[in-house]
Amino acid sequence: MKQESNSLRAVLFALGGNFAIAVIKFIVSLISGSSAMLAEAIHSVADTTNQVFLLIGRRRSAREANELHAFGYGKEEYYWGFLVAVLLFFVGGCFSLYEGIHKVTNPEPLEKYIYIFVVLGLSIIIELKSFTVALTEFRKASTGPILKAIRESTDTNIFVILVEDFAALAGLTIVLISTLLSLVNPLFDAIGTLFVGALLVLMSFFLANELRKLIIGENISREMRNGIKAILHSHSDIRHINNIRSMYIGNNKFMLLISLDVEDRLDASAVECLTSQIKTEITGIYPNARYIYIEVEE
């Protein structure tokens, strides 16, 4: 429950920050005529919509299991995150690329540079704060190398926000540099727009691929599998571990299927006692193991 409240805090903070930034960027892009700022405004709209979709997915995934969905609705969060990655970021990225190409063929000098730099400064401060909040919450669950931790994370709320905040900071840096260079040549504003569009498309593919693995059914980490094996090996009545299969069914929640060979001397009552003890030990260390099935062969 604590981890869920942490991810909710990160989502709400990012939602408020991105909405405010999007409105300001659109206004300044209209005043200044900056296509790079317009691309960043679209980026912020995509980020804002992303948080709304994450909240929808979070709410829908909390529904109880029923006859149609025996393992619950946990994967709803993956679906909504995937929808954002494919539709919003890809479409937003393609629009930014189109706008950049248009500006390359028709470069125009920017106006009211001071507004652009003020908005960029405020946006960087807000995005840095949002990124810091997301990174802090993310690090509470993972302390390994950041890229490896992101790729292994199954909490879409945290890792999607972390990736998009990083991309937002990268996009703002691109716009800042391109705006400074456009003081010399307006063409650099268009080039900055193209870079922001490419950034959005790349982020779309990265997020879509990570969420695709979770939707299909991703296995738990090797470290977790080794930990479960250690629990099984601690029982002398287990003769052989045939296989351990798992699949994430929601943010950090997974199901586990274990096949074992046990000593022939164990009767049905002893086998039941053994499997019950194994389940208790596994959930004691891995409380997110929501469904554990143990197949025993004598």
Image: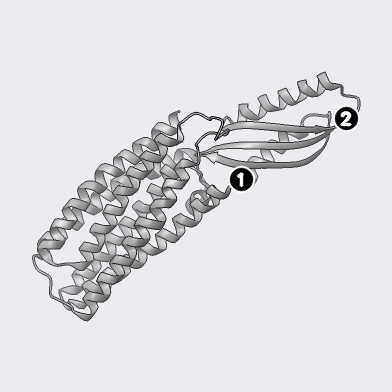
Relative to 104, say whether 12 is above or below: above
Residue placed under numbered mark 2 in the picture: 263
Q: Can residue 176 be seen in this snapshot?
A: no
The answer to which quarter of the image holds residue 265 is top right
Report x, y in % for residue 82.
Answer: 44, 51
Residue placed under numbered mark 1 in the picture: 221
Relative to 22, say whether 229 is above or below: above
Amino acid type of disc 1? Answer: Ser
The residue located at (65%, 30%) in the rendering is 282
For the residues labelled 2 and 1, the Cα–Cα distance comes to 29 Å
The residue located at (23%, 47%) in the rendering is 19
Report x, y in % for residue 130.
Answer: 31, 45
Q: Nearer the viewer, residue 65 or 161?
A: 65
Q: Nearer the viewer, residue 92 or 242?
A: 92
Relative to 178, say whether 200 is above or below: above
Determine the residue located farthest toward the top in the rendered image. Answer: 269
Amino acid type of disc 2? Answer: Glu
Relative to 290, say whether 103 is above or below: below
Quadrant location, the N terminus: top left
Q: In the visual, does 259 lie left or right of 1?
A: right
Q: Secondary structure at mark 2?
A: loop
The answer to which quarter of the image holds residue 256 is top right
Q: Can residue 285 be seen in this snapshot?
A: yes
Q: In the visual, does 101 lie left or right of 242?
A: left
